[in-house]
Image (tube, rainbow, N blue to C red):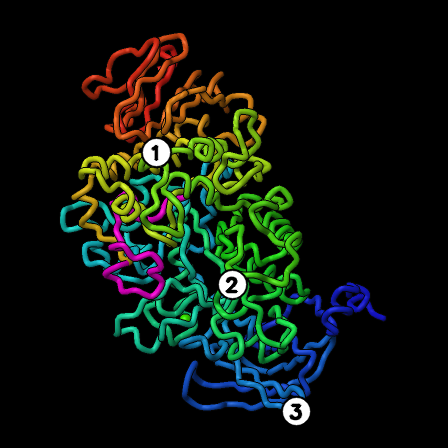
């Protein structure tokens, strides 16, 4: 028995019947002298490797039979320089010729990801790639995430961007809207966000890369090749090198501007399980199956992968490490993370944090449908405290602020729905344990789930469901235009003054609308795109968001990193008025230069007067403006003592006079 077989766990022998391979050379290993192929396919009786001169069509250069090797792998070595040639595998299993597929580990592919490409990765590095480090990040508490789709970012002509809809759009500085407002990457710097969260940018299936002259759109939650960038965002989807180089240029440019890059990863299902690589090399292994042999569908997309199977777990870990190292990705957002098991997520966190402890991991702590994965093993929100170094989205504060996701017209706190005050408070402390929260009254969770505030993503909207403006239109039905604009500020004023890691849906600062569409995953640009003209039209909203982010960055009291610190410094007021939440962050919390900070949220459609603690207080934020040295807006420039009046539908922040 050799070392490799000693490492086999009883679990995989019992449940899968296949030997696991523990080496790190699955896929293609390229040198100018030889290329080595290794693929794991224990049930195969034979595997044919074909080499092509192009990524599609073209000529077959070689047809070769692979050799069976250790631990269920098959291997082939080709002498000579095979750079930029394309390849596929075709297995025979149980006497049946399976589909010809790309390598699941392929690091480069041709158009539409149908063939792998032998790539010399060093030749894909843009100039200067070696000299740019990840931007500084002291604490996850300092993050402000901005969630964007590559195409939406730049496809509208008012972006002033040349490479519309492409990775390269993120490399263009100095771009302006027709009205002269900063767009693109300059806009991000002006806004002050720290992380760009990209909707899927791995190779996905639903956009035909051979027809890019026709209008096509998809969010991309339909994985085809996990380890290569999507081709439709590259200037040339045919040459496998181009998408890699341009993706790196995007990361390099964002890093140069001090912005980190997060990838949305979708390891929980594949677009077409039966047709893709996994299932044609090891049928039934990488996916959870029903007893009748059909695919289980916990993802709501026709299949779900099995992270708890040794070789799927290994695949996920190696894939993530590859993106973190080769592309210098700074964070990963796990789609339907509840379909992954806790052990896998913790191994992922361990491995990635060994590369760099500032890589940020978070996910959707739920599933889309039922799954055979036992409840206690699921990486769901309620199990967050068992996840070490992985955060979860708080749908609690999201739906408390805006209203429930399943009914567009149902209002939330912002639009005057009573009874959500405890849910707002739960969000303010980022789902941690706090003695002043009445947990049974929280909308979705009857107990705290985050070990610390940095395990919670605080947000009000993302790409799913209505965007903020559309939800305001649906729920603030007796509002005038000014009232609606107040809510556009109010919703994220709550987010950005709450503990946790804030996430903004791109374009909220531009009053983005999707014209009432919710699940816009395949709708045209006209629905999904950012319209940069809006920046001029709604400049006051943009300024407000920019100033809120700046306030948060300047004041660590809003960015506490431990539950104990929050418990010690943040006290809620007993306010016996509906639709009002108030709290005091005291004693220079988290070394804030402000000693005492009072924060109030008034969701009433009228002004409300609240009592203040003893002392003289300076207003630093109202719905009209954020002014950290004291408001100069009419009527808000006087010291407040005893009580103060908060305007309708807005936040107010006051600071003790001595701190200003
Ligand atoms: Ca694709």
Q: Nearer the viewer, residue 521 or 113?
A: 521
According to the picture, the residue beneath numbered tag 1 turns out to be 493
Q: Position of residue 595 (x, y in %)?
A: 44, 16
Could you say which quadrant of the image residue 293 lies in? bottom right
Q: Is residue 440 above or below residue 352?
A: above
Q: CA distance from mark 2 to mark 3?
A: 32 Å
Disc 2 crowd rating (10 Å Cα; few below 14, some 14-19, many 20+) is: many
Q: Is residue 410 above or below residue 129?
A: above
Q: Is the distance from the Cβ of mark 3 to the nearest ligand 1 atom less than 8 Å?
A: no
According to the picture, the residue beneath numbered tag 3 turns out to be 95
Could you say which quadrant of the image residue 601 lies in? top left
Labels 2, 1: front one = 2
Helix, strand or loop status at disc 1:
helix
Q: Position of residue 12 (x, y in %)?
A: 74, 67
Could you say which quadrant of the image residue 337 lies in? bottom right
Residue found at x 67% / y 83%: 44
Residue found at x 25% / y 35%: 486
Q: Position of residue 556 (x, y in %)?
A: 45, 27
**Residue 505 lies within the magenta run:** yes
Q: Quadrant of ligand 1?
A: bottom left
Q: Position of residue 217 (x, y in %)?
A: 32, 66
Q: Is residue 416 above or below residue 527?
A: above
According to the picture, the residue beneath numbered tag 2 turns out to be 299
Helix, strand or loop status at disc 2:
loop
Magenta-colored span = 503-527
Q: Nearer the viewer, residue 433 or 595?
A: 433
In the figure, is residue 583 to the left or right of 152?
Answer: right
Labels 2, 3: front one = 2
């Amino acid at each position: 028995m050799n070392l490799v077989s000693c490492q086999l766990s009883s679990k995989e022998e019992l449940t899968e019947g296949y030997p696991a391979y523990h080496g790190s050379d699955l896929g293609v290993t390229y040198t100018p002298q030889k290329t080595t192929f290794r693929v794991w396919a224990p049930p195969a009786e034979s595997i044919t490797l074909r080499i092509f001169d192009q990524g599609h069509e073209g000529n077959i250069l070689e047809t070769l039979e692979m050799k069976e090797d250790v631990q269920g792998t098959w291997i082939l070595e080709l002498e000579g320089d095979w750079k930029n040639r394309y390849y596929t595998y075709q297995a025979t299993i149980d006497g049946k010729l399976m589909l010809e597929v790309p390598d699941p580990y392929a690091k480069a592919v041709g158009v539409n990801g149908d063939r792998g490409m032998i790539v010399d990765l060093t030749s894909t590095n843009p100039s200067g790639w070696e000299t740019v480090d990840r931007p500084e990040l002291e604490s996850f508490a300092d993050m402000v995430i901005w969630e964007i789709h590559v195409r939406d970012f730049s496809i509208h002509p008012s972006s002033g961007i040349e490479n519309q809809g492409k990775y390269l759009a993120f490399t263009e500085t100095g771009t302006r809207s027709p009205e002269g407002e900063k767009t693109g990457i300059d806009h991000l710097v002006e806004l002050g966000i720290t992380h760009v969260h990209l909707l899927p940018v791995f190779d996905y299936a639903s956009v035909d890369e051979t027809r890019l002259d026709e209008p096509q759109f998809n969010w991309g939650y339909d994985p085809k090749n996990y380890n290569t960038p999507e081709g439709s965002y590259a200037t040339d989807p045919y040459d496998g090198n181009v998408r890699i180089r341009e993706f790196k240029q995007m990361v390099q440019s964002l890093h140069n501007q001090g912005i980190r890059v997060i990838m949305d990863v979708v390891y929980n299902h594949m677009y077409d399980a039966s047709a893709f690589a996994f299932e044609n090399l090891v049928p039934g292994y990488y996916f959870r199956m029903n007893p009748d042999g059909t695919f289980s569908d916990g993802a709501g997309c026709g299949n779900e992968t099995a992270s708890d199977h040794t070789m799927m777990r290994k695949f996920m870990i190696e894939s993530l490490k590859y993106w973190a190292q080769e592309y210098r990705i700074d964070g990963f957002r796990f789609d339907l993370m509840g379909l992954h098991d806790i052990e896998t997520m913790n191994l992922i966190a361990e491995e990635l944090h060994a590369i760099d402890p500032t890589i940020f991991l978070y996910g959707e702590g739920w599933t889309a449908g039922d799954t055979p994965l036992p409840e206690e093993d699921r990486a769901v929100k309620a199990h967050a405290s068992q996840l070490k170094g992985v955060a979860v989205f708080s749908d609690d504060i999201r739906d408390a602020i805006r209203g429930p996701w399943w009914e567009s017209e149902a209002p939330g706190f912002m639009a005057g729905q009573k009874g959500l005050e405890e849910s707002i408070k739960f969000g303010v402390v980022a789902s941690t344990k706090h003695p002043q929260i009445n947990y049974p009254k929280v909308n979705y969770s009857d107990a705290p789930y985050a070990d610390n505030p940095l395990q919670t993503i605080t947000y009000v909207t993302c790409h799913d469901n209505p965007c903020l403006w559309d939800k305001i239109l649906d729920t603030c039905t007796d509002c005038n235009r000014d009232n609606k604009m107040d809510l556009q500020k109010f919703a994220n004023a709550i987010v950005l003054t709450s503990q946790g890691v804030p996430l903004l849906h791109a374009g909220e600062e531009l009053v983005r609308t999707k014209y009432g569409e919710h699940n816009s995953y395949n709708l045209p640009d006209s629905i999904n795109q950012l319209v940069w003209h809006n920046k001029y039209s709604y400049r006051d909203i943009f300024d407000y968001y920019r100033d809120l982010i700046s306030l948060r960055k300047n004041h660590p009291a809003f960015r506490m990193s431990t539950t104990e610190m929050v418990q010690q410094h943040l006290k809620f007021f007993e306010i016996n008025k509906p639709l009002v939440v108030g709290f005091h962050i005291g004693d220079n919390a988290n070394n804030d230069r402000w000693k005492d900070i009072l924060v109030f949220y008034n969701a009433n459609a009228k002004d409300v007067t609240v009592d203040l603690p003893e002392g003289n207080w300076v207003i630093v934020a109202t719905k009209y403006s954020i002014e950290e040295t004291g408001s100069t807006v009419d009527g808000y420039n006087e010291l407040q003592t005893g009580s103060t009046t908060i305007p309708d539908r807005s936040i107010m922040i006051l600071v003790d006079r001595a701190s200003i």
